[in-house]
Amino acid sequence: MAVNLQKGQRVDLTKGNAGLTKLMVGLGWDEAEKTGKGGFFASLFSSPPPPIDCDASVLMLNENGKLTRKEDLIYFGNLRSMCGSVVHTGDNLTGEGEGDDEVIIVEINKIPPHIHRLVFLVNIYDCVRRNQHFGMIKNAFIRVVNASNNQELIRFNLSDNYHGKTTLFAGEIYRYNNEWKFAAIGEATNDTSLREIVKRY
């Protein structure tokens, strides 16, 4: 049975899970109902707003929490790490449908020794021009699944009020005493692009 985490909680991944080597990290979200202004007649003369395009990414950080090279940012423009330990399965442009919207595969036994943290985040593509933010998103979550048997190990529902925020740091997988753990982060920022996010690291 999956462990449902609250913001700030941490849980062991590999300790007590002998043989766990391949994880599927799923991130999901839904667009909240639009509240139109001006009623029916206004809607006749205005084009519908574009769908909210959320993008999941992974920062592969060293023990000092630094991104040492651009290839360690895994996102829709760089779907696979050089070591092959982290693979993004592709971009979802709308977030429609049930379940995971974007999926990242992590093979923890392939992660290089100098990488100590995998930070999973979601940001809104072209958020400034489209005037979009995470207050327009609902039902966001991150979950970790044992890829060998499809067992859900961890789920963290991101239920805070993220109105006005454009980047959401969902969770991280990190080394601790030769084991791997998961931390539920749930923090949002006003970073408007991956370029701005990377500057933090």
Image (cartoon, rainbow, N blue to C red):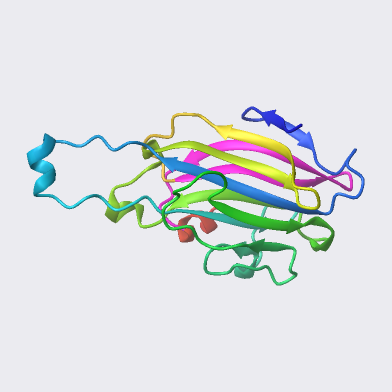
Residue 35 is situated, as x and y percent measured from the top left of the image, at: 25, 34
Tell me which residue sits at (35%, 52%) in the image.
127
Height in image: 156 above or below 67?
A: above
Residue nearest the viewer, comparing 76 with 46: 46
Residue 179: x and y, percent?
Answer: 86, 45
User: What residue lies at 73% left-to-right and 57% top-to-bottom?
Assistant: 106
Near-viewer residue (125 or 175): 125
Q: Quadrant of the C terminus?
A: bottom right
Residue 201 visible, this orientation: no
Q: Nearer the viewer, residue 8 or 156?
A: 156
Query: Relative to 134, is 69 on the left or the right?
Result: right
Left or right relative to 22: residue 95: left
Tell me which corner region of the image, top left, top right, bottom left or bottom right, holds residue 166: top left
Location of residue 53 (image quadrant): bottom left
- Rendered residue at 28%/48% (across/down): 131
Residue 187 inside the magenta-drawn segment: yes
Magenta residue span: 167-193
User: How many labels sit on residues?
Assistant: 0
Q: Position of residue 120 (x, y in %)?
A: 61, 49
Whole-percent x, y for residue 60 in the image: 67, 58
Tell me if I can see residue 119 in this picture. yes
Horizontal side of 60 relative to 139 (left or right) equals right
Question: Is residue 55 covered in magenta?
Answer: no
Taking depth in this image into account, of 104 and 125 the one nearest to the observer is 104
Q: Residue furthest bottom?
A: 82
Q: Examine the residues drawn in magenta and state their main secondary structure.
A: strand
Quadrant where the N terminus lies?
top right
